[in-house]
Image (cartoon, rainbow, N blue to C red):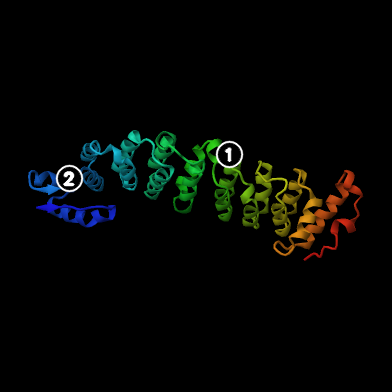
Amino acid sequence: MITLHLTRADDYEGVEQLLRRVTGSITEFVNEVGQRPLKISDYDMAVLTIEDGDLTAFQAAYSKVPDQTAELLPLAAGRPGAVGRKMTAHLLSNAKDLTGEQYLTASKRAVDTGDFEKVRLFYEQAEHCASDLPRTYYGDVISYAYDEKIHIAKALLKQATPEQIGGASPRLLHQAALRDDYTTASELVKKGIHADKAAVDVIRAFQRSPWAVTHLLEQGMEVEAHNYRALHACINTGNTQAAQMLLERGMDFGHYTDWTKTNAHNYPLTNDKAFETLYDSWKQNFEGPDSMRSEEQQMGGMTLG
């Protein structure tokens, strides 16, 4: 009697090698033993057909275990080639109420194969298949692909909607900045990524390309009016043009100087020249009831450098 006790995908590797030596393929082996006392579950059979790449056998086996789609999907998604893509499409056409975590895991397996068409299937079927799909899903897949499969990341970004990118983590913009990838950063900003929480990191990452920050701000990169750390980053990196743009968009330089004095220990001012340039410009152009405050009141005993 031959009895297979397989509980994880890794368990199949040794069995697969053995069965292939016997008959050339797993499914042919199972068919050959016929009436012999082989004990194998319908789920195990479905897994073996994925490993074997037998689409017809897979469809037959899967029809007996449609309730185990969540377990089979990452296996099919991780199988490269046209057969793996067709298996994935078959599972996605029947998948419903998968958790967001399950769906993201399978999507990442598809990315690992480098098959953009397969990954696009996940993108297109996401809302149909996952019951609690997180708003960050689309950005999470792009972020995952950006590290190793950048061609997939760029293709996904190109077809993503503003709503999908609007839900992405700001970390994605920081990733692009770390690679000095202005093209991708610009596309993310144009499609409405919420950049404020990553603004400081983006400004620092583009320190050697300060023009990139000013262009992103011109394109509408989100920086809240009270995000004084972003203005601070502009000044410390010497990007006075970007700093001036933040002031023109409503950031209050007087409040920033107060913030700088309060946070001098954690966020020291390291570029006196840039600060003085901004301060002089602001002092000359500032209008309003606070314009009578003296320079001494503005600086308040502040020590630069």
Residue carrying label 2 = 27
Amino acid type of disc 2? Thr
Query: What is the x, y in percent for residue 55?
Result: 24, 40
Amino acid type of disc 1? Lys
For residue 224, above or below residue 125: below
Query: What is the x, y in percent for residue 172?
Result: 54, 49
Of 6 and 214, which appears nearest the observer?
A: 6
Q: Residue at x 70, y 54 (%)?
A: 229
The residue carrying pointer 1 sits among few (fewer than 14), some (14 to 19) or many (20 or more) residues within 10 Å by Cα, namely: many
Quadrant in the rendering for residue 119: top left
Of 215 and 1, which appears nearest the observer?
A: 1
Q: Earlier in the sequence, mark 2 or mark 1?
A: 2
Q: Nearer the viewer, mark 2 or mark 1?
A: 2
Residue carrying label 1 = 191
Q: Residue at x 46, y 47 (%)?
A: 151
The residue carrying pointer 2 sits among few (fewer than 14), some (14 to 19) or many (20 or more) residues within 10 Å by Cα, namely: many
Label 1: element kind = loop
Instruction: Determine whether, in the image, residue 121 is placed left or right of residue 21.
Output: right
